[in-house]
Amino acid sequence: MPRKGMRSLCCVAKTPSNLQPPLTLTPRQSLESAAAYGIIESAADIIERWNTETSTFAKVTSMFYEDKAEAMVFIERVNNLQKTMDLLVSEDPNSERLMRAQRLMEIAMKRLQKEFYQILSMNRAYLDPESVSTRSSLTSARSSYSDFPEDDDSNTVGDSIVEVEEVASKVMTDLRSIAECMIASGYAKECVIIYKTIRKSIIDEGVYRLDVEKISIAKAKKMSWEEMEIKIRSWLEAVKVSMETLFKGERILCDHVFQSSDAIRESCFTEISREGAVLLFGFPEIVSAKISKKSSPPEKTFRLLDMYSAIAGNWRAIESIFSFESTSVVRSQALKSLVSLSESIRSQLRHFESRIEKDSSKVVVHGGGVHPLTTSAMNHISLLADYSNVLVDILSGSPPPDRTLLPESYFNVSDPDVSPSSELAIRFAWLILVLLCEIDRKANHYKVCSVQYLFLTNNLQHVVSRARCSNLKQLLGDDWVRRHVGKIKQFSDSYKRLAWGPVLATLPENRAVELSAEEVKERFEKFSESFERAYGKQSVCAVPDSELREEIKLSIARKLVPIYREFYNTRRSVIVAGAGGTTREGEGTSGSSYVSSPLSCLSRQSTP
């Protein structure tokens, strides 16, 4: 403005007292007006330079990519322009300067919309959820390389991490600068529309690639279990990726870009992620509805447990990522799935127990070996023990078995490893007890009592062996194992007594008593006949556990061989004298044949 004009603005004209004095500006107001003019013109210079409607270069070029320093000046000038507009509105809403500033602001916002869109579109590799979700850990990962000697490989990896970190950080900072400028200028809606459109497409694509699709209950019921199991495995992987990268990364990016507005952050993240998240966490409900408690094999229980573990294990992340009130539907859906899965799992466990109790198979295992029911049930129970951490929660809502039905000595109250009040331990102990009771009934299928006890020995040995090498040992405690090992010994001793006791009974209890040659001969004949008969019966019996088999063989040998050898050695002379001469063992004397056969059989195979 010419100095003359300035002076005319500052001087006070003399007017008659009966007239209103003209509008005058104080020196301060004149300075503010001049400053506003300077800010508008300064902003106009850079805004017009990047006007997409008047410059072909501006139309095809990204300002942030071409000249980052000038882009930041652009943001600064626009912010100053907005402040000046606020001042001008308070002074004169109809001023020409305000209208000019408004036109410049519209041009600037079109430019920033274009930049915001270009940055989001061109940097998808650096803004994908995985890159964003791991951004916070890149610095620590990079610093860890400094702990090792430098070499070419470590330098390459370290440089790559630095590059990714720097680019991602710069891109996110640029987006935040544009978003804050547009929001402050009253163009939040335009900014949000661009962000939601691009980012929702990325999240929807991510959910699709994770093979998460909407399936109706009717369609699920028509699918084979093999097809459903494939989808369950895909879902389990999808939950892991979604919570560690997809939704986590989007929440981090959204919080960063729209840090200046809580409402916009919530609105953007909710619209972008809610649909995909509800679809993801709604799948377990459909699976639970498909699995029928009457027709489902016990193996399906583990798929339900896997799904429950996936949600429960990520519950804190779910609450953190979907913490907004508008995303409560996601938390509710995840909770509904947990409840649905819990009900299905409890139903499956009740059905599993019922199947053991009502097992109608009349399979008689050859030789008193391990019954298929024992094998399958213990496989299932030991695998269930691997899920003890979630079963505690799942079973907390259902009444435990009546402890009065358990033997008084089933748990040792003083055992520090397991508390008798532990509901989960009681449940597992009860399941095993139900199995053992059924095995006890199946032992009656054997007509020979000794084989019945061998059957009980083998099956209880299998139960204890599986318990020892699984989490069952930790649940049930060492005392439970010791008590059942003692029970194995009782069954084993009963088997040995019934199977081999009659053989020992053929020898005199008092081996020092005087016997005639005929009586000795008769004793040897009875022993030989009894031994051969027992050996023939027991040789077809089975002891699958190698350690138990060796223990039984040695136990029988220790009892039988010394007694027989002592009797033979003390009566050998009587036999030889009665035969009328001395001959070598096994060369035609009647007594020697009674000796060689039992001893050789006993040494070769004295047990099943």
Image (tube, grey):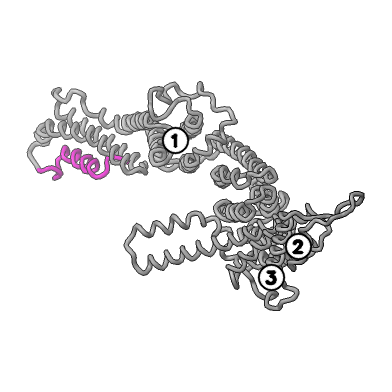
Q: Position of residue 537 (x, y in %)?
A: 35, 39
Q: Where does label 1 land, which residue?
A: 446
Is residue 279 depicted above or below 337 in this figure?
A: below
**For the residue marked with disc 2, what is the amino acid?**
Arg
> Magenta residues, as a range?
584-608
Q: Is residue 260 left or right of residue 427?
A: right
Query: Closer to us: mark 1 or mark 3?
Result: 3
Q: Is residue 287 left or right of residue 508?
A: right
Q: Is residue 294 visible?
A: no
Q: Where does label 2 land, which residue?
A: 7
Q: Where does label 3 land, which residue?
A: 45
Q: Residue at x 31, y 32 (%)?
A: 496
Q: Is residue 298 magenta?
A: no
Rounded to the nearest whole Å, what is the CA distance between mark 3 and mark 2? 28 Å
Q: Is residue 322 visible?
A: yes
Q: Position of residue 513 (x, y in %)?
A: 15, 22
**For the residue marked with disc 3, what is the amino acid?**
Asp
Element at badge 3? helix
